[in-house]
Image (tube, grey):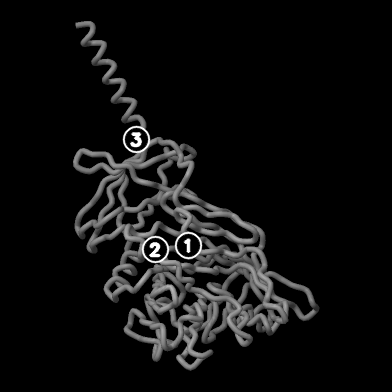
Amino acid sequence: MKKIHGLSILLILLVTQVHAQVIAGFVVKAGTISRNNSIVYTTLPPAAANVPVSMEEVSHGKRIPVAVNVYKGQLCWIMEGITPAGTERKYELIKGVPVTNPSMKTVLADGHLLLEEHQQPILQYNFKTVAAPAGADTVYSRSGFIHPLWAPNGVVLTNIFPNAGHLHHMGIWNPWTHTLFEGRETDFWNVQKKEGKVRFNGQLETLSGNVWCGFSAAQDHIAFLKDGTEKTAISETWLVQAYPATQDGSRRQWDFTSTFAPATPNGITLLQYRYGGGFGLRTTPEFTAQTSQVLTSEGKTRKDADSTRARWVKISGTTAKGKAGMLIMNYPDNFDSPEPLRVWPENMEGGELMFNYTPTRMKSWQLYPGARYQLKYRVMVYSGDITTAEAEAAWEEYVHPPEVNII
């Protein structure tokens, strides 16, 4: 009897220790739409602060390890596979060993950050000033932009310094074009006017993990004053988060968030103009009117998309490495969303493509001192092509994420 009693106590202690490792449980509800590899976010429970954590899915009596990222009080994981509408899945957060060799990495190199998964490049953020082409005005030298952006099959989707007339186009970038700053119209986009530009300001944070990799980078929108001095008009922070590719390797998503505020007591007015700010993109020169296609959520193409609104925009094209493209999704809380578009007509620059989600195309936007503003986009890059139904499903997933309840 004593042996049995001692064994019982031991089992009770072991069970208690196992359960003591569980910090919190979560129920994730699919809601009204079917989910496919959903990106799930929820608040980190206070009990998990400052301790290493891991996650397991609890399903049919089994415990399945699930990769999880923790960043600034938020948990993130991928709800893998198909989760039908109306169903739910359960997860538990436990004390665990931190990941020492994550699959999603942000690699710091000479003047840039490279986001990669298993050494496959995703995108590059250039924080060091990239010199203008030989013979060009040094005003075109620029920092604080994304290039290259790769499709999963290795196609480079962006371009910088594309031609003599548009040397200020820099991959993915977002300066404002027509603004009123301290009584003077100031253009931060067309740097050749020497009124202003955007610069990386030295504040950089890199993040790696098994769910996403990325970075936070601070940038200043600098006004060039008449007396030859400079003044920061807008302080901005980019947060870029890249997620794992799908199992077949043909799709990948990444999030782009710009948070910004006026840098002076008088604020700044982002005046109504046909392009500027938001999400600016100069695509690869291999995407021309003959080799590429544009389709918006409202059924517009390159022939008629300019100056219309869209929840998402799909850009596909054929290159020497194969067909690839990107889906750019606009978040509903953005200013004047669904945001208006600037899409170059087919006869511009030999048919090459510049695209811009431009929040101030239809109306001005006053930025007040002491306030913070935000614009959010999700980008899916893909090899081959995607259907309209896939594009719509991706946008629905982005703006209506699964519901997470703590249990």
Q: Are marks 1 and 3 in contact (CB under 8 Å)?
A: no
Q: Nearer the viewer, mark 3 or mark 2?
A: 2
Q: Position of residue 367 (x, y in %)?
A: 57, 73
Which residue bears the numbered disc 1?
Answer: 122
Which residue bears the numbered disc 3?
Answer: 22
**Residue at 50% over, 67% down:** 374
Say which quadrant the C terminus sits in: top left
Q: Earlier in the sequence, mark 2 or mark 1?
A: 1
> Which kind of residue does numbered mark 2 sit on?
Arg
Q: Answer left or right for 6 relative to 54.
A: left
**Residue at 50% over, 61% down:** 240
Q: Nearer the viewer, mark 1 or mark 3?
A: 1
Q: Gap in Å between the C-alphas at discs 1 and 3?
A: 35 Å
Which residue bears the numbered disc 2?
Answer: 252
**Residue at 63% over, 86% down:** 164
Q: Are marks 2 and 1 in contact (CB under 8 Å)?
A: yes
Q: Position of residue 104 (x, y in %)?
A: 46, 52
